[in-house]
Amino acid sequence: MRTEQPQTIYLKDYQQPDYLIDETHLTFELFEDHALVHSRLFMHRNSQEQGAGLPPLVLHGQQLELRSVALDEHALSAADYQQDEDSLTLQPQAPEFELAITTRIEPQNNTALEGLYKSGGMFCTQCEAEGFRKITYYLDRPDVMSRFTTTVMAERGAYPVLLSNGNLIASGDHEGGRHWATWEDPFPKPAYLFALVAGDLYRIDDSFTTMSGRDVELRIYVEPENREQCAHAMDSLKRAMRWDEQVYGREYDLDIFMIVAVNDFNMGAMENKGLNIFNSSCVLAHPDTATDMAFQRVEAVVAHEYFHNWSGNRVTCRDWFQLSLKEGLTVFRDAEFSADMNSRTVKRIEDVTFLRSNQFAEDAGPMAHPVRPDSFIEISNFYTLTIYEKGAEVVRMLHTLLGPEGFRKGTDLYFERHDGQAVTCDDFVAALEDANGVDFSQFKRWYSQAGTPVLEVDSHYDAASSTFQLRCRQSCPATPGQPEKQPFVIPLRMALLDGEGREIPLKLAGEGQGRGTETVLAVTEAEQVFVFENVSEQPLPSLLRGFSAPVKLVYPYSRDDRVFLAMHDPDGFNRWEAAQSLAVDVLQGLIQIHQAGRPLLLDQRLLEMYRSVLLDPQLDPAMVAEILRLPSEAYLIELAEVADVDAIHHVREWARLELAKALVEPLWLVVQRLGAEPGSYSADAAAMARRSLRNTVLGYLMLTDAPAALSACVQQFVEAGNMTDRQAALVALVNSPHEQQKHAALQEFAQRWSDYPLVMDMWFSIQASSPLPGGLERVQGLMKHPAFNIRNPNKVRALIGAFANQNLANFHRADGEGYRFVAERIIELDRLNPQIASRMLTPLTRWRKFDPARQELMRAELTRILACEELSTDVYEVVSKSLA
Ligand code: TRP
Ligand code: ZN
């Protein structure tokens, strides 16, 4: 156990900084075994105190070797300041002063990948959230914004490229083969947006002319062997820049925008001003090596980081409790961008599926927290699905309530009013309110209350008065520290369908005007009734269209109702939703039957619904693929009171096989209809949709023991002209009982792609995700593979993460060995990279969901982790809260 208890930080304790930093001048001397960081800070006192009441200047700093401190060019001695593990405290007397500090650090030994570190042969930085304090002593908080000038010095041979934020203003050579470059960023920024890169990098150039006619240089820097894999990222960047101009009126503000791809990175990417640093997995994409999913991820992440230039950088966060101010808004913006670039409905289905199986689980677990948390121990633990995904849903609801024009008026005011400032979620909402003359005080409970609300709706049709009543009741389960919840504002997008599935005109009692055939009801009370008039027949409601609020909707639909909606709802999203909820209902019923030891029988309505979807040539193939995908095990676990993992896995696999057997003919028909993949690859939505359906169908066909399926799969694996099809074939083979073909394919794949780390990540994760027995032993074997490296977060996610998150049958082995394996890896990782160790804990934190025996085993592992000496604050916080 750690001796000192880590401190909890509270939002209510927020205070303005006592000092501010007007200018930051940094000089980095980079060497193989250390780096020297010289900083000159031009500061002034921010507080009004005088004389004896002068506040001390407390600079943040961690793992720094302090070489020198000078105040207004007078060197200080150790008696003039205090130093501890996390800070350096001095007492300047003047209201304005210059502070010069030199620190020594060792980037080559930085395995936490926070601060200045080495990835392969290059130096790079990651400063969000609190990494800058591992570079030099500083006021490392987002409300301290400063203008940065940065000089980087390194050996020219190994590090010909020297980059930092802003514009290059000077460069030159030193003796002994060293050189230097000076960059100046004219925009004041918090330290978390600082970046530096030094390496031997290949540069891809392009340009963009902004809406006001300024030319911006665009550059992507990658390791030379990846130079052929940048075109998609560059195209995505240009599309994102144009989109932000068109949809938000936001123009880029520097003359140069750079992206650097690195192999070792804790997250997806980072929006450092003018110099975004990316996990290579979110930049590189070539049809031979990246799947359609990877292409879409690159497009989304490039856009996300670019959009941060306004939602995050020009207007930033006052403190880290406001993280969702930038992340929720930027995720919403990137989701809308992706929706505009591809299929809107499919994008929404993917996002809702992800939110419901992962964020809902977080909201129901021990780490549940509001979109704007009240407290934290380690801020790195709060880069969560709640901050990002639920935060984006909150912004989406504001967009829904205001409409696109009202929302745009609001964001225009927000960006104008707060340009150059560090602000709060309240400031964001206030701008939307002021621009539209509305009151969102009740709505703001979405920021302060955790937990997923339940919206129970029932209805009553009265033929005599031609009225249809919808009764809505909302509640929200207790979450840590929040036993009681106040009612939320829930935007309920809905329509009423007649017997043919047509939308009927909506007129609410008490309103003069009709509402067209689709409307958004604002549910604001714990219980609330809406009465529709002039309803001439019993309608079927289509509720929560487009998932208009992040809630659990409960409505007493019969299975026949769901089939009807799946076939007839004019709203594509809700058609999918009806099919999905029918499948959930059927599987949940089967799980009970299985638990009672009775024989399983598939509801023919599900089968027939799938059959007609398969045979409908009018439907978007991507939609067909989404409908055919059964709800995931993770989602079924989330929905269960006590999740019976064995039953869930057994029943879901059984249903897949039943479906495959019963639908063999239409499945083959679809294969024929789609035809062979055209020779040349295209990443457009239509081509992706065809591949998505063809590969979903292949997955089903491979469950049957038809030799034709196996040979089609092997043929696809061998002849595929792109990685999407090759990967899908490999997945099907790995999960099949055809040992010989499986091993041949795995071996061939590993040989062919051994020089491509991202492709090898896929190879690891396909195997780590396979639910066939012996999964743990396979993963343990793969840990010894030469391509595996526990210091590389992508490898950890591909192997250990995939095992713990995608392979529920093996992770939840009844003997607890899956838990033990993951716990041991967490302990090992915590010494190297606490952020990654902490993320690997998520599946174990869900222990309350499972049967008593598994609960006991999972808790035992958490307890064992907690007992370790020198635990990071990251792991300590998650484990201790999970056990509380
Ligand atoms: N702001 C980054 C984003 O766009 C998040 C991020 C990147 C991050 N790297 C990080 C957060 C490292 C914490 C630690 O989402
Ligand atoms: Zn972000």
Image: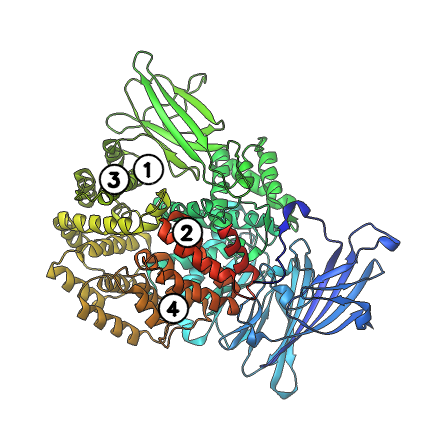
**Residue drawn at (62%, 58%) of the image:** 5
| Contact (Cβ within 8 Å) of mark 4 with mark 3 | no
| Contact (Cβ within 8 Å) of mark 3 with mark 1 | no
Query: Where residue 719 sits in the image (x, y, percent)?
Result: 21, 68
Q: If you read the primary sequence from the N terminus, does the residue marked by circle 4 or circle 3 appear first?
A: 3
Nearer the viewer's eye, disc 1 or disc 2? 2
The residues tagged by marks 3 and 1 sit, at their Cα atoms, a distance apart of 22 Å
Numbered mark located on residue 589 in the image = 3
Q: Which residue is mark 2?
A: 847
Q: Which residue is mark 4?
A: 758
**Label 3 secondary element:** helix
Residue type at tag 2: Trp
Whether disc 2's CB lies below 8 Å from ligand 1 is answered: no
Q: Relative to the observer, which residue lies in front, 388 or 635?
A: 635
Q: Which residue is mark 1?
A: 574
The residues tagged by marks 4 and 1 sit, at their Cα atoms, a distance apart of 36 Å
